[in-house]
Structure formats: C-alpha cells, structure tokens
C-alpha cells in the first residue's frame, strides 16, 4: 500500500509534499514548548485544567499552522509557475 498525493503539489521531497514535513516540524516544536510549560501550569491550576489548556492550545496551534501552510504552498506554487517550473524539486523515489 502506498500514499497517493494530489497532483500539482508545489514541492515534492522524496515524493512527499513539503507542507507535510513543515507541518510535522511545527507541530512537534509546538508540542515540545507546551510540554515544557505543563508542569508549571499543573502547579498553578491543577492537573485537570492544565491538561485541558495543553490540548486546547495544541489544537489551536495546529489550526494556526495549517492556516499558514495553505497560503504558503499557494504562493510558492505561483512563484514557481512564474519562474517557469512546474515543481521546484522532485527527488526520485528510492533515492
């Protein structure tokens, strides 16, 4: 079984659209920052409220990341098309 990506993605790395890599990087970065804050929140608000704040901030952060990535990919695609390139980088599978 393989993943099937939409055609016309602006930048492919190992056959995977680059927003996938960016999204995972930013999500893990956000998670790490919030995880470090969690013990302080737990001491201040208690375990239940700190857990809710952690997950709500994580979801809001991910939605913000997605809201950033969609215009980013659209803008990058337009720049590549203006430069005469359909895709800026396409590494072959198995490379």
Image (cartoon, helix red, strand yellow):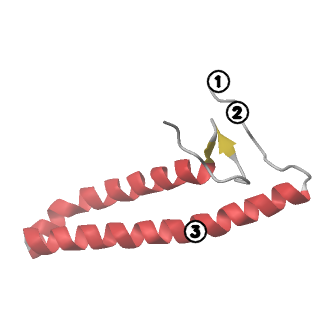
Relative to 69, residue 56 above or below = below
Front: mark 3 or 2: 2
Q: As drawn, is 28 to the left or to the right of 94?
A: left
Front: mark 1 or 3: 1
Nearer to the camera, 57 or 10: 10
Q: Are marks 3 and 2 in contact (CB under 8 Å)?
A: no
Q: Quadrant of the rendered structure where residue 83 is? A: bottom right
Mark 1 → mark 3, Cα distance in angstroms: 30 Å
What residue does disc 3 label?
68
**Residue farthest front in this picture:** 1
What residue does disc 2 label?
91
Nearer to the camera, 33 or 11: 11
| Residue at image location 86% in from the left, 57% down from the top | 81
Q: As drawn, is 4 to the left or to the right of 42?
A: right
| Residue at image location 25% in from the left, 67% down from the top | 54
Q: In the structure shown, which secondary structural element does the residue marked by tag 1 occupy?
A: loop
The x and y percentages for residue 8 are 74, 54
Mark 3 → mark 2, Cα distance in angstroms: 25 Å
User: Which is more N-terminal, label 2 or label 3?
Assistant: 3
Q: Quadrant of the C terminus?
A: top right
What residue does disc 1 label?
95
Mark 1 → mark 2, Cα distance in angstroms: 7 Å
| Residue at image location 67% in from the left, 44% down from the top | 12
| Residue at image location 45% in from the left, 71% down from the top | 63
Q: Residues within 10 Å of mark 3 (few under 14, many from 20)?
A: few
Relative to 39, residue 45 above or below = below
């Amino acid at each position: 079984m393989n993943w099937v990506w939409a055609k016309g993605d602006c930048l492919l790395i190992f056959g995977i659209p680059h927003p996938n890599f960016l999204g995972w990087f930013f999500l893990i970065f956000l998670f790490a920052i919030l995880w470090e804050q969690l013990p302080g929140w737990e001491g201040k608000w208690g375990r239940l409220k700190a857990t809710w704040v952690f997950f709500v901030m994580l979801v809001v952060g991910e939605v913000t990341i997605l809201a950033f990535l969609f215009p980013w990919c659209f803008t990058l695609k337009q720049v590549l098309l203006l430069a005469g390139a359909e895709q800026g980088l396409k590494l072959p599978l198995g490379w």
